[in-house]
Image (tube, rainbow, N blue to C red):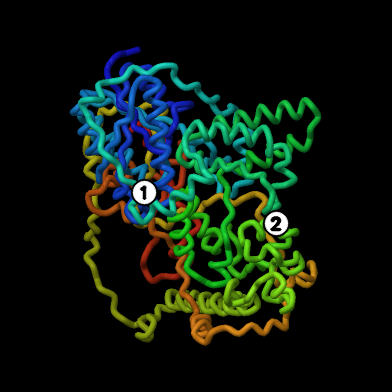
């Protein structure tokens, strides 16, 4: 124990078990646990209603656990986390700050700003990996670049020369700092209109790190054994229900990994091949999700609408998974689903829910319908519908659009997009400006040869930093406005295996799963008018303009380095740089190049 008072900054690591930041604080002496609620820092990504409900419950249980260990959680409401940290430091006289890494762009910039500002006033700042099996810069391909497919990434993880660190036990006791000097603020996570809806969540979910451990134990000792067999069945109880616990850091990923591995070894010794295979598939599924493609491809709604809906309604809403997941299913990424691909919901239903149990559970109005018609009730005879108590268009809706109509509309939209792309290429190659005619004979503006463009210099580049960096400290990517959006999202290994048959091949499947050709469903004239509109495609994403102005991103030392030099210096570990999309009018290929700008993590860690 080195003495002194340390602040442990809780974020999405709401547990006392296997919490490296908390363990470091306990080793250092007196501990002041702090949670800062500053949702305004998230910009457009203000936490959704159900996510805020979970956070409220989890913080309450965390505070109870800390009180049992000898301290209590200080909660602060602020619009700027760094300012609140400075206030707590001033009130308590803390000399050290410990926290665990977050990896979304907004958090990276905020955390780097906190390190810079606090280090300048003499505060020792340390951060740790508590959320991943390996840091992103540790799992790279043979050329030192990140993987862009999940299969290759997972294979490299399994062949790493060292295993993930084992989970740490919770502290037996915490020596508390004087928390009375810094009273807590009352945090309001839900308004009156949200409380009624949120009350229903408690019937199905129990937040908190101790409840997360119970869910993990129950899954490993039960459904995990038959996971490889039942995981494709929509009506099976093989899901672990760990996702929200993992998102809020209530359950350690390292603990999940090691407990599943231990179970795998026991089953292997017993000759239980089914259980061993189940562990392999479960471990591969950690962090993966499935998303609905119906709204994006069939209805041709903007994928951002689905992203926003998921963000507001998912208990485990992750910015990375939500944004890249929806781009993946929409075909906006180079390794994602084909743009022209449409999955037939009816075929999907009979494939993953052959007996209709899943539909009957979540759509009780169809519970009396025979299995033959359960996935396409609009084709059922009238007497079948009457016997089941179903009146189409009244107590159960008609389909919004037919699959064959949706496929035609999608092909029309793609044709228009590709034609626009061809026109854009012609403009660049022939020097013709759209609507203005040939501009090749225009006299170019003559600039003096000795004239150079002024570039904005990072103030941090001219300063001498004395900050001591540790290996465990998180390293921050630079944010530029000239590079394209990093397009290396990881693709699930078994995506093609699990993908449904295209509706054009539906004739080879079960007769009941086909979309009948004689479906004479009438759609409203207004709806037909909407269908005639071909949506504009935009494959860029705005994760908040955190580059401009005086935001936290301006403090990143990586920005002071030349982009050219970073691309040339390939001696160290290299990773892609995230950046907003370019807004110029050049072609799609020029707006979205396949190459990425990369930075040297090792050099960055040494220079601050």
Residue at screen point 78% across, 67% down: 509
Q: Is residue 172 left or right of residue 150?
A: left
Q: Residue 291, position in %: x, y?
A: 57, 57
Mark 2 or mark 1: whose residue is earlier in sequence: 2
Q: Residue at x 36, y 49 (%)?
A: 563
Query: Helix, strand, or loop for circle 2?
Result: helix
444 on left or right of 198: left
To which quarter of the image does residue 405 belong? Answer: bottom right
Disc 1 target residue: 563
- Residue 207 visible, this angle: yes
Residue position for label 2: 357
Instruction: Please give left or right for residue 69 compared with residue 273 in the image.
Output: left
Determine crowd level at label 2: few under 14, some 14-19, many 20+ residues with C-alpha closer than 10 A.
some
Residue 325 spot, x, y in % from top left:
52, 55
Expressed as whole percent of the image width and height from the top left, the position of residue 448 reads 22, 65
Q: Secondary structure at mark 1?
A: helix
Position of residue 98 relative to residue 598, above or below, is above
The residue nearer to you, when weighing 391 against 274, is: 391
Q: Position of residue 127 (x, y in %)?
A: 38, 30
Between residue 105 and residue 140, name the one nearer to us: 105
């Amino acid at each position: 124990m080195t003495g002194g008072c340390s602040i442990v900054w809780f974020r999405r690591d709401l547990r006392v078990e296997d919490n490296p930041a908390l363990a470091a604080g306990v080793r250092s002496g007196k501990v002041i646990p702090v949670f800062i609620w500053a949702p305004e820092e998230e910009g457009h990504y203000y936490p959704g209603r159900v996510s805020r409900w979970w956070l409220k419950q989890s913080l309450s249980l965390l505070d109870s656990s800390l009180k049992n260990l000898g301290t209590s959680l200080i909660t602060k409401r602020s619009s700027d986390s760094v300012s609140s940290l400075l206030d707590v430091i001033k009130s308590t006289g803390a000399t050290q700050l410990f926290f665990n890494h977050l990896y979304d762009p907004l958090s990276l910039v905020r955390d780097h700003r906190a390190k810079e500002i606090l280090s300048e006033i003499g505060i020792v700042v340390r951060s740790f990996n508590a959320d991943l099996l390996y840091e992103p810069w540790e799992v790279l391909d043979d050329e030192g670049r990140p993987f862009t497919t999940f299969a290759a990434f997972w294979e490299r993880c399994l062949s790493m020369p060292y295993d993930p660190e084992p989970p740490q036990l919770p502290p037996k006791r915490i020596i508390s700092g004087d928390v009375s000097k810094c009273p807590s603020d009352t945090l309001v996570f839900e308004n009156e209109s949200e409380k009624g809806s949120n009350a229903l969540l408690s019937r199905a979910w129990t937040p908190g790190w101790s409840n997360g451990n119970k869910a993990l134990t129950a899954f490993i000792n039960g459904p995990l054994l038959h996971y490889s067999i039942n995981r494709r069945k929509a009506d099976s109880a093989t899901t672990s229900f760990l996702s929200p616990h993992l998102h809020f850091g209530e359950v350690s990923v390292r603990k999940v990994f090691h407990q599943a591995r231990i179970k795998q070894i026991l089953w292997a010794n017993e000759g239980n091949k089914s259980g061993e295979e189940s562990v392999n598939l479960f471990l591969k599924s950690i962090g993966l999700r499935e998303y609905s493609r119906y709204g994006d491809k069939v209805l041709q709604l903007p994928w951002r609408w689905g992203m926003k809906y998921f963000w507001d309604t998912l208990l485990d809403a992750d910015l990375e998974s939500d944004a890249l997941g929806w781009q993946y299913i929409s075909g906006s990424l180079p390794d994602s689903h084909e743009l022209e691909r449409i999955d037939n919901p009816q075929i999907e239903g009979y494939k993953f829910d052959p007996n209709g149990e899943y539909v009957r559970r979540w759509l009780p109005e169809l519970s009396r319908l025979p299995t033959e018609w359960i996935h396409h009730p609009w084709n059922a005879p009238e007497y079948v519908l009457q016997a089941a108590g179903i009146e189409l268009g009244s107590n159960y809706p008609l389909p919004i659009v037919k699959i064959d109509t949706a496929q035609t509309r999608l092909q029309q939209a793609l044709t228009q997009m590709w034609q626009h792309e061809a026109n854009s290429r012609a403009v660049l190659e022939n020097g013709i400006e759209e609507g203005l005619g040939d501009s090749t004979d225009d006299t170019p503006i003559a600039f003096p040869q000795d004239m150079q463009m002024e570039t904005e210099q990072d103030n941090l580049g001219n300063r001498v930093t004395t900050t001591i960096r540790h290996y465990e400290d998180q390293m921050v990517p630079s944010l530029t406005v000239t590079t394209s959006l990093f397009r290396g999202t990881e693709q699930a290994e078994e995506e093609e295996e699990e993908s449904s048959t295209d509706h054009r091949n539906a004739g080879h499947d079960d007769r009941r799963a086909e979309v009948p050709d004689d479906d004479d469903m009438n759609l409203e004239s207004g709806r037909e008018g909407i269908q005639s509109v071909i949506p504009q495609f935009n494959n860029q994403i705005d994760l908040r303009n955190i580059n401009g102005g005086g935001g936290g991103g301006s403090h990143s030392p990586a920005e002071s380095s030349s982009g050219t030099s970073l691309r040339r210096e390939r001696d160290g570990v290299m990773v892609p740089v995230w950046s907003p999309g370019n807004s110029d009018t050049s072609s799609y290929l020029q707006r979205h190049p396949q190459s990425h700008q990369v930075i040297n993590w090792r050099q960055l860690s040494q220079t601050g």
